[in-house]
Image (tube, rainbow, N blue to C red):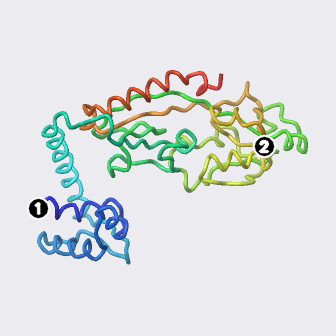
């Protein structure tokens, strides 16, 4: 079977949309649809459930995806061995990170997936339980309660954790939380009101300038001139950033240099990340 034909299966299986797959492959979306149909005809069972431009893999498609991704990894390993010294430090390395941590990187309010080749190195809140990855703990970081002085002046004083129930909070949209590590409110008791919900931690930080109290990473919020910490000695959350990359990439020079740079940067930023 021709590997080029399998690419026309792999991209829509990952992207879940025909138009996105076509853009990644650099062809018209009709070409992708025709190649998928030809592959289904040769293999037998349907590989996708189609709904307009949305392509959802069937059970047969999911089984094939596992096999094709294994073939892709093997193919890339062969390419790397054949290229020898062709691996240079000038090539692109894509780094995916959480929004608050990686404003100038590929920062999105969801998990960036190495299996879909959305990035080369990922900084994430959760350590994967399985997968062919090189994984290291990057750093711990703390979150605290932040609010504006104007809000405090207009509302009851905050002297203890019990006082928090009377106040408005800014928080996440719970149904859209992409990590269990983002469940904070349960640890301090449900507040009286959620004034604003957003999937964006940066939006929450902006809203805390007047809408209510927000639980924010100290490395970002403590440098905000319109916010102050409250109950810093009573309420603090500690979370961990993990860093991972595919095993097959660990010997590439550009990946090693980037990996080592990110680890060194994490060591240099320990005080900032821990709110000191």
Which quadrant, please, contains the N terminus? bottom left
Which quadrant, please, contains the C terminus? top right
View extreme (front): residue: 90
140 horizontally vs 96: left or right: right
Spatial separation of the CA atoms under disc 2 and disc 1: 62 Å
> Residue 98 at x, y = what percent?
51, 43
- Within 10 Å of the Cα at label 2, are there few (<14), some (14-19), or many (20+) other Cα atoms? some
Which of the 4 image quarters holds residue 162?
top right
Which of the 4 image quarters holds residue 185?
top right
- Residue at (39, 43) in percent of width and height: 94
> Residue 43 at x, y = what percent?
13, 69
> Residue 78 at x, y = what percent?
14, 42
- Check disc 1 and report the residue beneath it: 2
Disc on the earlier residue, 2 or 1: 1
52 horizontally vs 83: left or right: right
> Residue 168 at x, y = what percent?
78, 48
- Residue at (39, 29) in percent of width and height: 136
Residue 145, which numbered label?
none
In terms of secondary structure, where does tag 2 sit? helix
- Within 10 Å of the Cα at label 1, are there few (<14), some (14-19), or many (20+) other Cα atoms? few
Residue 165, which numbered label?
2
- Residue at (14, 75) in percent of width and height: 41
Which is closer to the viewer, label 2 or label 1? 1
């Amino acid at each position: 079977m021709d590997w080029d034909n399998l690419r026309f299966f792999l991209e829509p299986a990952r992207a879940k949309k025909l138009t996105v797959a076509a853009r990644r492959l650099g062809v018209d979306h009709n070409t992708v649809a025709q190649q998928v149909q030809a592959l289904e005809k040769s293999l037998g069972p349907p590989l996708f459930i189609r709904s307009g431009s949305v392509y959802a893999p069937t059970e047969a498609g999911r089984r094939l995806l596992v096999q094709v991704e294994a073939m892709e990894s093997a193919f890339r390993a062969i390419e790397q061995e054949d290229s020898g010294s062709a691996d240079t430090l000038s090539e692109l390395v894509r780094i995916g990170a959480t929004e608050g941590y990686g404003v100038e990187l590929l920062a999105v309010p969801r998990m960036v997936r190495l299996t879909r080749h959305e990035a080369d190195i990922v900084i994430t809140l959760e350590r994967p339980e399985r997968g062919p990855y090189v994984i290291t703990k990057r750093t711990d970081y703390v979150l605290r309660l932040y609010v504006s002085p104007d809000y405090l002046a207009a509302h009851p004083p905050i002297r203890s954790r019990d006082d928090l129930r009377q106040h408005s909070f800014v928080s996440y949209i719970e149904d859209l939380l992409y990590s269990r590590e983002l469940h904070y409110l349960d640890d301090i008791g449900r507040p009286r009101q959620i004034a604003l919900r957003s999937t964006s931690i940066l939006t929450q930080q902006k809203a805390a300038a007047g809408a209510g109290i927000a639980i924010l990473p100290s490395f970002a919020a403590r440098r905000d001139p319109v916010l102050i910490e409250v109950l810093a000695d009573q309420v603090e959350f500690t979370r961990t950033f993990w860093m991972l990359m595919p095993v097959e990439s660990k010997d590439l020079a550009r990946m090693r240099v980037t990996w080592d740079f990110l680890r060194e940067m994490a060591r240099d930023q320990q005080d900032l990340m821990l709110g000191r």
